[in-house]
Image (spheres, rainbow, N blue to C red):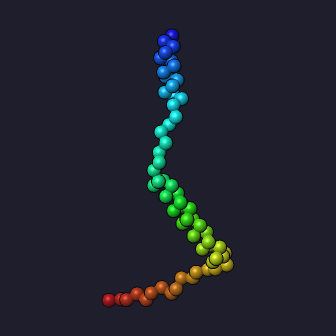
Amino acid sequence: MSDPQTQIDAARVVLSEPEVRTGVMGTLAAASLAACAAVLLAGVMILGPGVAIEDGPPPASQNF
């Protein structure tokens, strides 16, 4: 068996609180993704399912 003090030290390492990261880049990226999704969803709701964007006629090809 291991020494009790070794087990206590190992338990303290496991139970220690993780370091808190205070980076704002992840938060900023998540906020921008949510904003883009909201704008796209609003565009879909405004256009609605009945709007069809048709392609124009194909351009005339030039034969040389």
What is the number of callouts on the image?
0
Quadrant location, the C terminus: bottom left
Residue at figure coordinates x 51%, y 10% from the top left: 1
Nearest the viewer among 21 and 43 is 21
Nearest the viewer among 61 and 9 is 9
Residue at figure coordinates x 51%, y 13% from the top left: 4
State the image coordinates of residue 36 (x, y, percent, origin top left): 54, 66
In this rendering, is residue 61 above or below 42? below
State the image coordinates of residue 49 (x, y, percent, origin top left): 66, 75
Nearest the viewer among 25 and 20 is 20
Q: Is residue 4 left or right of residue 46?
A: left
In this rendering, is residue 19 above or below 1? below
Residue at figure coordinates x 37%, y 89% from the top left: 62
Nearest the viewer among 51 and 16 is 16
Locate residue 15: give its quadrant: top right
Give the residue at the far top of this rendering: 1
State the image coordinates of residue 59 (x, y, percent, origin top left): 44, 87
In this rendering, is residue 56 above or below 48? below
Give the residue at the far left of this rendering: 64
State the image coordinates of residue 50 (x, y, percent, origin top left): 67, 78
